Image (tube, rainbow, N blue to C red):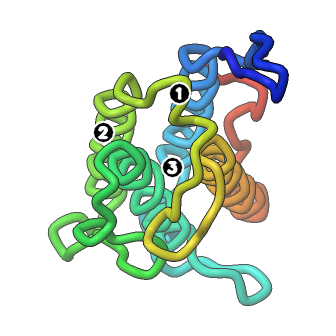
Amino acid sequence: MTTQNSNTATIETASFVSSENMLKAWMGHRRLTRRVIEAFPEDKLFSYSIGGMRPFAEMIKEIIDIGGPGIRGIVTEDWESIGGFDNHSVDEAHRSKEGLLQLFDQGTDEINTFWPEISQERFQENTVVFGMYEGQVFSSILYFIDNEIHHRAQGTVYLRSLGIEPPAFWNRD
């Protein structure tokens, strides 16, 4: 990225991570999240809870409604037709593990489709995601990723409490 200071000298600044590498890292997290969903028992997915936390299916719905739609919104700047945090897109036809996985995969495809349209400059621009959360594009995307990791970790705790060994957190292949 090139900027000019008040003396009109050109200053080169480098990004700490390329757009391509950031996407690769997120896709590694997506693969791991998918494995956690796959490991979850179907009969517990929509009902099992610990300490008042939401069932894992509700957390997955949030991941589904943030990742793909969030990247699409950043690219199109159309937040009106995008669900967001409180508009879970899971209908009765998808109220199963297979249905959630299908929607999750569609979100991954949406991220991969729209990601190349985010210019290097756009990462630094301000945005208001889902019509209510203001920040720079890169910080909003990091939030999408953090949210997924957070809920995946809750799912991992649920799996352990059910006596199921979760997928290794470090294996993102």
What residue sits 75% from the left and 31% below the top?
Answer: 168
First-in-chain label (3 vs 2): 3
Seen in the picture, residue 145 relative to 81 is either above or below; the reply is: above
Task: Classify mark 1: helix, strand or loop.
Answer: helix
**Which residue in the protein does label 2 denote?**
110
Residue 113 in the image: state x and y as whole percent.
29, 29
First-in-chain label (3 vs 1): 1
Instruction: Judge from the rendering whether residue 45 lies leftward or rightward of residue 161; answer left or right.
Output: left
Query: Does any portion of residue 82 appear in the rendered image?
Result: yes
Residue 95 in the image: state x and y as whole percent.
28, 70
What residue sits 23% from the left and 64% below the top?
Answer: 94
Question: Disc number at residue 48?
Answer: none
Residue count near mark 3 (Cα–Cα under 10 Å), binned few <14, some 14–19, many ≥20: many
**Which residue in the protein does label 1 denote?**
27
Asked if disc 2 and disc 1 are in contact, CB closer than 8 Å, the reply is no
**Which residue in the protein does label 3 denote?**
37
What residue sits 28% from the left and 60% below the top?
Answer: 78
Asked if disc 3 and disc 2 are in contact, CB closer than 8 Å, the reply is no
Task: Classify mark 2: helix, strand or loop.
Answer: helix
Q: In which quarter of the image is the C terminus?
A: top right
Residue 157 in the image: state x and y as whole percent.
77, 59
Instruction: Judge from the rendering whether residue 41 lies leftward or rightward of residue 106; answer left or right.
Output: right
| Residue type (three-letter) at the residue carrying disc 1 | Met
What residue sits 78% from the left and 26% below the top?
Answer: 170
Seen in the picture, residue 68 relative to 57 is either above or below; the reply is: above
